[in-house]
Image (cartoon, helix red, strand yellow):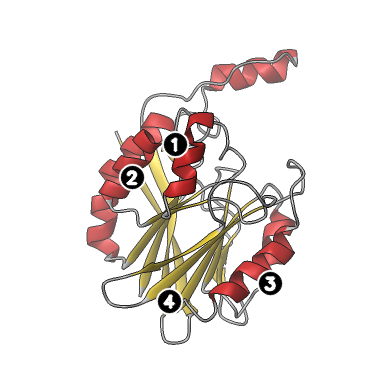
Amino acid sequence: MIVLVAGDIVGRPGRRALNEALPALIAEHKPDFVIANGENAAGGAGITRETAAPLFAAGVHVLTMGNHVWNQRDSYAYIEEETRLVRPANFPPGAPGRGSYVYELPSGVRVGVVNLQGRTFMQPIDDPFRAGDEAIKSLESSADVIIVDIHAEATSEKLAFALFVDGRVSCVFGTHTHVPTADECVLPKGTAYITDVGMTGPSESIIGMRPADIIERFLTGLPKRFEVASGPAVLNGIVVDVDETTGLARGIERVRKRVK
């Protein structure tokens, strides 16, 4: 089976890029399952019912999240009720929503999704290695294919986790830094991996935000509200070929689609 992953969707330009680019990517790669990171979908920070709906309508089966999952406080109830939206599994008990989910395709193939958040250079949170291990164990009997989104800053943390679970999951892809890396590979035991899939958002930006805002912050060191950039946009992602009978990957490639 073919899995298509779209990187972090940033604001309105990212939602537009996904809606415009996804049909062509679906026609070209014919994915059985589409997953995207939506933690920046609402104004660059968080997600809402209104911003998630068109993403699901465009063909995304499951949305993963990250450190901005709680930025839209009005969406706590939505995160709790929408099973197709998966937030990091290593948030402490009592947080709304779920850290894993199994989506059954019409073919009968069951796709398990796990979302994790790193701790290196990020806010304090529970251990993603132990939380990920527990989430994967809970899916082993109920999913044919398991995909993990590790939303983290440090390359070493993402790669360490991928090697930690190599052979137990179909794919580990990194999100959060918004810049695609060129290290896509199938690890020795059969897990597809990339450190970061990049973002789906404005291409004339600094990781999705207006360059002037970011540059001013660097020049002055003063607090500055960042706003999502406008203009042309791009969808960055990966396509993974998975043997659903073994749950292991046969191949992985990067994809990049620009929209005006």
**Alpha-carbon distance for marks 4 and 2?**
24 Å
Q: Which residue is mark 3?
A: 163
Q: Residue 21, relative to residue 4: is it above or below?
A: above
Q: Position of residue 258 (x, y in %)?
A: 34, 42
4 and 2 marks in contact (CB < 8 Å): no
- Earlier along the polypeptide chain: callout 4 or callout 1? 1
Q: Residue at x 49, y 30 (%)?
A: 74
In the picture, measured across the screen, residue 32 lies left or right of residue 169, that is: left
Q: Residue 198, relative to residue 243: is it above or below?
A: above
Specify few, some or many for label 4: CA neighbours under 10 Å numbering under 14, 14-19, or 20 or more. many
Number of labelled discs?
A: 4
Q: Say which quadrant the C terminus sits in.
A: top left
In front of the other: label 3 or label 2?
A: 2
**Alpha-carbon distance for marks 2 and 1?**
9 Å
In front of the other: label 4 or label 1?
A: 1
Q: Position of residue 73 (x, y in %)?
A: 54, 30
* Res 167 visible: yes
**In the image, what residue type sits under mark 1?**
Ala
Residue 41's label in the rendered image is: 1
Secondary structure under the numbered disc 4 in the rendered image: strand
Q: Which residue is mark 2?
A: 55
Q: Quadrant of residue 167?
A: bottom right
The answer to which of 118 and 198 lies nearer the viewer is: 118
Q: Residue 81, relative to residue 163: is it above or below?
A: above
**Alpha-carbon distance for marks 4 and 1?**
28 Å
- Earlier along the polypeptide chain: callout 3 or callout 4? 3
In the picture, measured across the screen, residue 90 lies left or right of residue 28, that is: right
Secondary structure under the numbered disc 3 in the rendered image: helix
Q: Residue at x 51, y 38 (%)?
A: 76
Secondary structure under the numbered disc 2 in the rendered image: helix
